[in-house]
Amino acid sequence: MIKLTTLKEVPPFAQGLVRDVRVRWALEEAGLPYETRLLAMGEHKSPEYVARQPFGQVPVIEDDGLMLFESGAIVLHIAGQSDRLLPAEPAARARAVAWVFAALNSIEPPIQQLVEIDLFHAEAEWAPMRRPSAEQQAQARLDALAAWLEGREWLEDDFTVGDLIMATVLQIPRHTELVTGHAVLGPYLARCEARPAFTRAMDEHMKAHSQAA
Ligand SMILES: N[C@@H](CCC(=O)N[C@@H](CS)C(=O)NCC(=O)O)C(=O)O
């Protein structure tokens, strides 16, 4: 059975956003059972763990002897075991993978920049100076994504791993109205989050934290 390793304790502002959520969601969509190992405080920086995840971050999975890190790679590995997430037809499959990269390479970096300013460095002297341009950059990427999504239910014809990863990226700026207040992106995210597999994944994620408390 697939074994997922993630953090036991995370601060409230990060709960629900830890990258194990996207892995749990993919596993639920694919209908694959899994067990979870929760790391004690600081354990993700231990030499034993860094041998599995070079940057000392979560998540990692073990699947039949394969040790895999980076949530995008993990989710693609899981998606490869389910035509619900990755279409069998080669062109549709390539498009789904392209959206995974778009989410992680084109949308997540400007959003993460905003999070760094707002949640990790809010008190820094430079924060008010940097924030307007960071927000402008995030907004520009989100507007481009919204233009693509206008009139569509999903990024491509059906829900794929691309939507799954995109949704978990769009959840990140939940401390702002950038997504939830957006006429196109808000309903798109809500459609993704309405999937029963997402609800099960989030329940398991939150349960892990409440057990840790
Ligand atoms: N690119 C990595 C990022 C993983 C990541 O940022 N993990 C965070 C939790 S969401 C973490 O482990 N933070 C603790 C740390 O960096 O020390 C992935 O997608 O797997």
Image (spheres, helix red, strand yellow):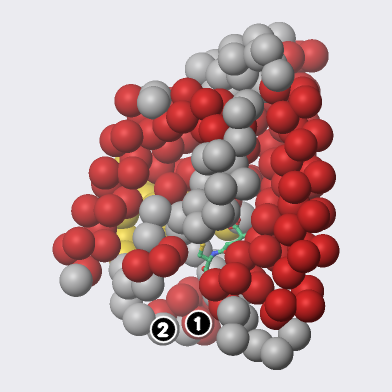
Instruction: State the SS at label 1.
Output: helix
Q: Is residue 189 above or below residue 170?
A: above
Q: Nearer the viewer, residue 203 or 91?
A: 203
- What amino acid type should be assigned to the residue bearing mark 1? Lys
Name the side, left or right, on which 44 lies relative to 129: left
Q: Quadrant of residue 208?
A: bottom left
Picture disc at residue 35:
none
The C terminus is located in which quarter?
bottom left
Q: Is residue 110 above or below residue 86?
A: below
Q: Nearer the viewer, residue 75 or 184?
A: 184
Percent of width and height locating residue 210 = 20, 62
Identity of the residue furthest to the bottom in this view: 125
Residues tagged 2 and 1 counted as in contact (Cβ below 8 A): yes
- What amino acid type should be assigned to the residue bearing mark 2? Gly
Ligand 1 is found in the corner quadrant, namely bottom right
Percent of width and height locating residue 38 = 31, 65
Q: Is residue 163 visible?
A: no
Name the side, left or right, on which 55 lies relative to 33: right
Q: Nearer the viewer, residue 76 or 137?
A: 137
Q: Is residue 95 visible?
A: yes
Distance (Cα) linking label 2 and label 1: 6 Å
Q: Residue at point 40% right, 80% down?
A: 43
Q: Residue at point 70% right, 90% down?
A: 125
Percent of width and height locating residue 119 = 54, 72
Tell me: is circle 1 under 8 Å from ligand 1.
Answer: yes
* Residue bearing the label numbered 1: 45
Name the side, left or right, on which 204 lies relative to 198: left
Q: Residue at point 50% right, 52% down?
A: 174
Instruction: State the SS at label 2.
Output: loop
Badge 2: few (under 14), some or many (20 or more) residues near its Cα, within 10 Å? few
* Residue bearing the label numbered 2: 42
